[in-house]
Amino acid sequence: MKKILIIKLGALGDFVLSVGIMQKIREEHPDAEFTLMTGSGFVSIARQMNMFSHYIIDNRQSWFNLSYLARLSKEIAAGEFDYVYDAQAVSRTIKKYFPAMRFISRKSFVWCNVYTQTEWHVEKKCRYSFGTCTEKKGKACEKLSDLSFLHGENKHFHELPERFVLFVPGCSPMHPHKRWPVAYFSELAARLADRNIHVVIIGTKTEAEEIQAIAAASPMAVSMLNKTSMLDIPDLARRAIATVGNDTGPSHMASLSGMPTIAIYDNRTKQGALRGLRSVNLVSPNTIEKITVDEVWKHLLPFLEEAGA
């Protein structure tokens, strides 16, 4: 049985976008044993894929944490992997993990960068050597992620209205430029209320101020602040008429659940970031507030009409 390691550390949006790639790798190696190296926050998603037998947790701690590095090295060496698929492909994995694996691996292996279609075949003559490395062009792993397998506990779903549009007003606190103005979300909520449509707003304590402001702007707004988990999001999106959100992981999850999703970006974001089949990507030519409520409404309206709302 071949032993395969897939490296995908995060963030959330990047991880769910890579689910399709992982599924494609499994199709190419149907009889292999798979191990996933990822952050601890993504193991719950990976477990529902029914693909991985083992997990190596890498929360990307400092390189000066020697005990942490020793633990990673020990687990990687014990895996005795035949293939390593680098689905992160950043400096940490390419410039640090790959050289380290060339040294600590106990056997010859193939390292694959899934994005550049590059393979490095490492031939080990003896243990604790770097091995001879040969570069080849391989086949890119491309497949749209399908999150139909993913389900949460849905503890608070009894609070949901029958017809609603899902709002995702938050994103990483490190990127405030990615947040569409709260006043715009509030105006959109008011327009939906005029059509007798609720909005359901999700987020954590980092978005509490935004969620409370939007909820106060419409009598038909339902706050789900701190009431949903990461695993709840696909089920929540499947119940919604559509999702409107910023460039953040939950928007990607809604999109990859196959439901109508509108994502709003500033000009520093690549166009087409959402890849779901029913997704709309609105990219500002400048700052994000240049995307108007009228523009979002124009793209949302066909989804409302389709749902008879």
Image: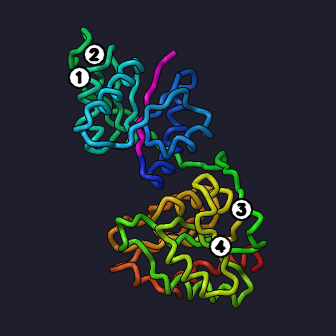
Mark nearer the N terminus (2 vs 3): 2
Q: Quadrant of residue 172?
A: bottom left
Q: Secondary structure at mark 4?
A: strand
Q: To which residue does mark 4 refer?
A: 200
Give the number of the mark in front: 3 or 1.
3
Q: To which residue does mark 3 refer?
A: 156
Residue kind at label 4, given as amino acid type: Val
Quick one: 72 or 242, which is closer to the camera? 72
Instruction: Find residue 123 and name its label.
Output: 2
The CA span between labels 2 and 4 is 55 Å
| Residue 191 x/y as whole percent | 63, 88
Residue at 57%, 44% in the rendered image: 45
The CA span between labels 4 and 1 is 53 Å
Residue at 27%, 42% in the rendered image: 62
**Is 38 located above or below residue 119 in the figure?**
below
Q: Secondary structure at mark 1?
A: strand
Q: Secondary structure at mark 3?
A: loop
**Is 155 located above or below residue 216 in the figure?**
above
Tag 1 and tag 2, C-beta contact below 8 Å? yes
